[in-house]
Amino acid sequence: MRGEFDFINSLKSKLKPDSSLTGIGDDAAVINQNSELQTVVSQDLLIEDIDFRRAWLPLNRLGRALGHKALAVSLSDIAAMGATPRYCLTSIGLPETVWRTAFIDEFYDSLLALARQHNTQLIGGDTSRSPDRIVIDCTVIGEIKRGRAVLRSTAKVGDLVFVSGELGDAATGLELLENGKRLSTGRTANPSLLTMDALIKRQLTPTPRVELGCHLAQHNLATSMIDISDGLAADLHHLCNASNTGALIDESRLPIAHAIHQLKTTRPPADLALYGGEDYELLFTVAPADKHKIPAHFDDESLTEIGIITEASEGITIKTGERSRPLKAKGFVHF
């Protein structure tokens, strides 16, 4: 059966090339604005029962979580281009029963709070009634100096592969939610509950790495970049396919939170880190000569070297100890 990215590639083949933009196939579109600046545009959907479930939180708290996440996932795409977000547009479809609650006010209060953190202005959108499910669409418009946008397609053989933050947190949070765990309703000092709350929050309210993306672009440090939404393995494949390269990842270097090892998850921690998705961390490549310019931490988040870009003929592989194997492009797929 045709998958999402097969469809995207077939759609790209039907479009007329335009030298004024970088279009379908990256984290965001890049459009020439003037001789100094380019406009960067990204759009994302959140669909009830696909991207979230109403049972995870009371409606008012769900509104706050979704207001944050709807904007955060689009901000993450802007971050992956190295751009600065400026404006957002948000459209939402709600069942009438949800409209009658505090959901919509909590949604926009939370979205605007995150927008203010990133100096981003809400400039429009649409509101509609839907039959039975919540549907959210968010567009973010950013800008960047001309020629500075960091693409997926510009990794070079020999570049080092880095990732920000920790991997697998969001996937572990999702597993907890699907197993009936919920956020604590009040203050707690229970270490186990605090750990689960932190992981669930990483699923519900991810942090877009906007400042890091801008830093890497402004200082010409990232040779290519993508945000981790489908999972490290899948998104590494997207980057390597766009750049026509391979990659070798060292499993022992994967930054996995100690909390994940403490929990009894149904999947091994490395699987959650590689294939879980929705971490919204940045996966980027760096020329070896610039390795010393990458700090160990940025805004209190670790930056970890996990591998190297190789020739396309060598494939995309992962090393565990002395043994290497193909790294499959497993991760979240819509179809």
Image: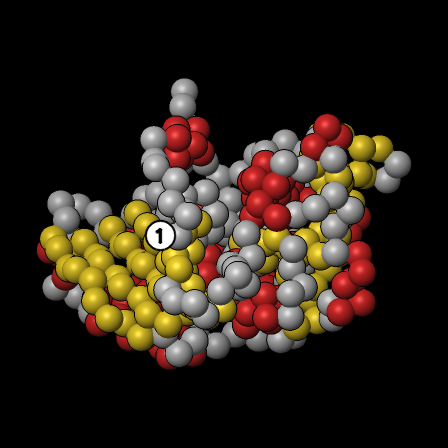
Q: Does residue 182 appear anywhere in the picture?
A: no
Judge left or right: residue 196 versus residue 160: left
Front residue of 176/201: it is 201
* Residue on which the image places disc 1: 44
Relative vertical location of residue 200 with respect to residue 246 in this rendering, above or below: below
Seen at 61% across and 48% down, the residue is: 154
Seen at 70% across and 32% down, the residue is: 312
Residue 307, image x, y percentages: 76, 48
Seen at 22% across and 47% down, the residue is: 133
Q: Does residue 96 appear anywhere in the picture?
A: yes
Relative vertical location of residue 235 with respect to residue 28 in this rendering, above or below: above
Residue 227, image x, y percentages: 54, 54
Residue type, mark 1 in image: Asp
Front residue of 37/79: it is 37
Seen at 17% across and 66% down, the residue is: 101
Judge left or right: residue 271 versus residue 78: right
Residue 103, image x, y percentages: 23, 65
